[in-house]
Amino acid sequence: MNAGEYKGGVTRYLRAPLYMIIVFAAGAGLLCWYDYTVGLISVLIVVVYAMVTLGFYRRNARMLSEEMARLATDYASMQKQFLEHFELPYAILDSEGRFLWQNVKLCDLTGKEKTYSKSVTSIFPEITREWLDREEGTDFDAVVKKEDKTYRALFSRVHLGDDTVDEPEGTRPMIRRQEDPSALYTMLLLDITESEKIRQLNEDQRLCCALLYIDNYEDTIAEIEAVKRSLLTAVIDRKVTRYFQEADAIIRKSDRDKYFIIFQYKYLSKLEENKFSLLEDIKSTKLGNDTDLTISMGIGVNGATYRKNAEFARTAIDIAMGRGGSQVVIKDNGNISYYGVRGKEVEKNTRVKARAKAEALRELMVSRDKVLVMGHQISDIDAVGAGIGVYCAARELEKECHIVLNTINTSLRPILDLFTPDHGYPADLFVTSDQAMSLLTANTLVMVVDTNRPSYTECPELLEKSRSVVVIDHHRQGGEKVENPILSYIEPYASSTCEMIAEILQYFSENIKLQAAEADAIYAGILIDTDNFMTKTGVRTFEAAAYLKRSGSDVTRVRKLLREDMNAYKARAEIVRDSTVYRDSFAISVNRAEGIESPTIVGAQAANELLNIVGIKASFVLTVYKGKIYVSSRSIDEIDVQQIMERLGGGGHLNIAGAQIEGATTDEVIRQIENIIDVMIEEGAIRLPGPAAKKHE
């Protein structure tokens, strides 16, 4: 027998007597050196020991091998019996996912014979060959269901031939494995039915906080007779209470037009299924009021604490109100969902809010050394005009003011030429992002106009560095917003930011005076965003225009400022000519013009032009510019393009919206837009008459 046939501790154990022969022989040799007689006797003893030892090895080699084989057999038999009657379902699968062996418990569970050799997918559809191949690592798991039971399937991938079995440290396997590249899977099932029920029960009982506001309570109450006012309030209370009774909710009225509601998470999905029908139910309430009564709701869920859920609800209701009301916003930790966003923003006739914001802005400016104003990237006339208005307010208080502007395009140049040192304006009135960062101090007020998304601003770093930020915008709020502004004035019903700035200037100071060029710039912003007073105009829009007219604005001068060059006009016409119509209602085109300075502006203008075609309900123009695809979308009244752009990652208004997309081609973006339209039609968010409602093949 050769001791080398065995491995690990067995080898060391069997070789120990052989090693001792060498030790004894060395000792006998030393004794011979000192005493020949004693040494000779020692040598004889060592020889006898060696002969006996080697004889023992030779005589008992077969017996030792048989005993070890019997031990291995008994060990394997015990292991097999253990797995065979293991209390947990256990199986071995081949590389294709087919059963090679299964224990009694698994046979009882599946009702299959031990000889069953089909794929595990036939019993557990969740476990497929593709899934097994896709999972990485040696150990992985999945949740599977069998009848009314839920199991966690624990898998272990074993490559035959690999020393993957754990051995005591410093040892090697007793028996060598033959190398085999094929893989096996072991599957162990753990019954987690009860724990899943407890987990689901815990999830269902999580607290949801909701804030419900009546958007236009004061205006609606003022319309109806005094005797009907209490009746209207009672009807609203009854509808709110009845709606949330199904959710077993607790409702508390915190004000005449405000409600605080809490309910369990398990009811939220039911409310989402009916798209919060309370919105339409309240809107249909008529007791002598001509104006539709609308509500907004903010819901906070999945916060770490009840207080966090309440904060989420507050954030959600702020977003809902900032988007024009008449909708539900759910803030699920980091995710935000919108419901009931169809419909037009309701213009508020009262100017109380504008006056309050003007007074608050004045107090903030008084306490600051300087003001930095910035709009969105690739600024348009509305953003620049609003910046000029803020400069006028700062000048009234004798405060230093700078407007952040990185890109000057052809549409802006005629206006910017009016605000040069030759016309009495500071040379650093317009600064770049780098210059703005160098001007920023601890006592600087940063103002964001014509956008409420930090990533869209000319210099997002300013928002990160400044602790004093003011936001003035007319776009609906989305999931991304400026964090913790000290003043936020967002009114989606406003036609433009310039309209809002014009209102603020009227209440900012009695002595404020606008120069003709300044009034022209602000008026031009209103004119552009309303498409010459054709869209999103209300009473307050014309009142703001009248104020600017009194301040010296001239329509003829503004018209000259807004003229475009021949190349841009031709490019716009080419976009309209190359457009395609999807579902007989949606015009889609790509701005392929080259050599024009402001392609995104031309794309937006072309989107407006496409609405002049009979049958077109919404238009989408794609412009590739500086590595991004800019999508300009427009509609007249029937289609909420803001919803479409939000699903594309953008935002905007009911009739004017856009998006910026990176890492995609124009064809891919067009397909995304078409898919979004298809999904929204299926969901009922877009309603088309007749054949247009059927998807085109």
Image (tube, rainbow, N blue to C red):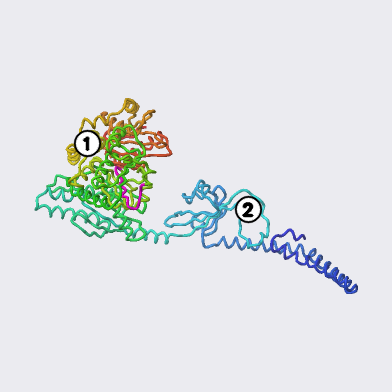
Q: Amino acid at mark 2?
A: Asp
Regarding residue 269, the answer to whether it shows in the image is no
Q: Gap in Å between the C-alphas at discs 1 and 2?
A: 85 Å
> What residue is pinned by disc 2?
162
User: Crowdedness of circle 1 by 10 Å Cα count: few (<14), some, many (20+)?
Assistant: some
Nearer to us in this view, 507 or 626: 507
Nearer to us in this view, 22 or 572: 572
Identify the magenta region: 439-450
Chain-order first, disc 1 or disc 2: 2
Nearer to us in this view, 238 or 457: 457
Q: How many marks?
A: 2
Residue 162: x and y in percent read 63, 53
User: Crowdedness of circle 2 by 10 Å Cα count: few (<14), some, many (20+)?
Assistant: few
Whether residue 444 is in magenta: the answer is: yes
CB within 8 Å, label 1 to label 2? no
Circle 2: element type: loop
What's the mark number on residue 516?
1
Residue 496: x and y in percent read 25, 40
Residue at the right extreme of this rendering: 37
In front: label 1 or label 2 = 1
Residue 164: x and y in percent read 61, 56
Q: Quadrant of residue 174?
A: bottom right
Q: Quadrant of residue 543?
A: top left
